[in-house]
Image (tube, helix red, strand yellow):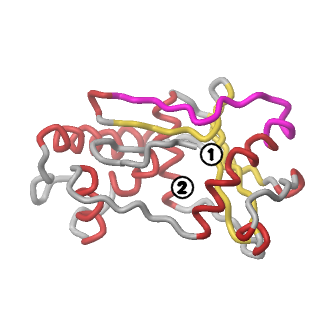
Amino acid sequence: MISVKSRAYWLGASDASRIVGNRNTETWQKWWTEKLGLYSEHFQNRYTLAGTNYEHRILRAVEKDRMIRLELDKQIRMEDLRVRINYDGVYGNSIYECKTYSAGKMFKVTKDYWRQAQMEMWGLGSDDLSIVAYPLDEENYNNYWLAIDREKLEYHKVERDDEFIEKKLLPNILELAECIKKGIFPEEGDK
C-alpha cells in the first residue's frame, strides 16, 4: 500500500482517464485543482477500504498461484513530466494491477482501468499487464482478515496500445506537466 495520499503536483496512472478526458466538466476542473494543490479530497468508502486492505494478501495469493515473487508497491517517478506511477505488484517486466469488486457481479475491464493499464505499461516500458480481479462478499467488507481463495482469482490481460499512448496520452501528459509547473489551468480550447 502506498502511504502518501496526496495527489497534488503529480499525474498518476489512475488519473489516465482525466489526463485524456474532457476538460470542460466540473469533475475535470475539480480534479485539476487537486493537481495544483488547491483542493484535496481523499475519497474512501467501504468498498475502497476493503480493496486497500485486501490488496497485499490478494497479491501474495497471486505469488503462490503463479509461483513468483512480486515487488509490491513499486513506484516510478518522472520529475520532468510530473508523473508518479504506483504499481500494485511487479515481477520483472510483468505488472499485476489488483482490483476488487462485489461478489455476484461480473468484473469488467472498464475504460478507466484500460487507460490506467496503458499508463502503467508505458511507465515501466512493459507490454505485459494483467488485472487481477477478486470478488468480495458482504463478509469481506465487514472483516478484512478473511483468507484469500486462490480459486477466485481472475486474470485479465490488457494489451498495450502504442497508438493511444503516443497520440493521446503522452501529448496530454506533456501539456499538463507544464501547467503543473506553472501552477495554471490549461488554456481554453487546448487538448
Q: Give the range drawn in magenta.
A: 62-78
Q: Is residue 72 magenta?
A: yes
Please identify the quarter of the rendering in which residue 4 is found.
top left
Of mark 2 and mark 1, the one earlier in the sequence is: 1
Is 12 placed above or below 103 here?
above
Residue 93 in percent (x, y) is at: 62, 26
Q: Where is residue 178 in the image (x, y as percent from the top left)?
A: 17, 38
Closer to the camera: disc 2 or disc 1?
1
- Characterize the local packing of mark 1: few (<14), some (14-19) or many (20 or more) Cα atoms within 10 angstroms: many
Q: Which mark is residue 97?
A: 1
Q: Is residue 120 magenta?
A: no
Q: In which quarter of the image is residue 61?
A: top right
Most distant residue in the top direction: 92
**What's under tag 1, amino acid-wise?**
Glu
Q: Give yes or no for contact between labels 2 and 1 (Cβ–Cβ under 8 Å).
A: yes
Q: Tell me the kind of residue under disc 2.
A: Tyr
Asked which secondary structure carries label 2, the reply is: helix
Give percent across and percent down for residue 169. 36, 44
- Residue placed most toward the observer, 164 or 17: 17
Q: In this view, does 67 lie to the left or right of 59?
A: right
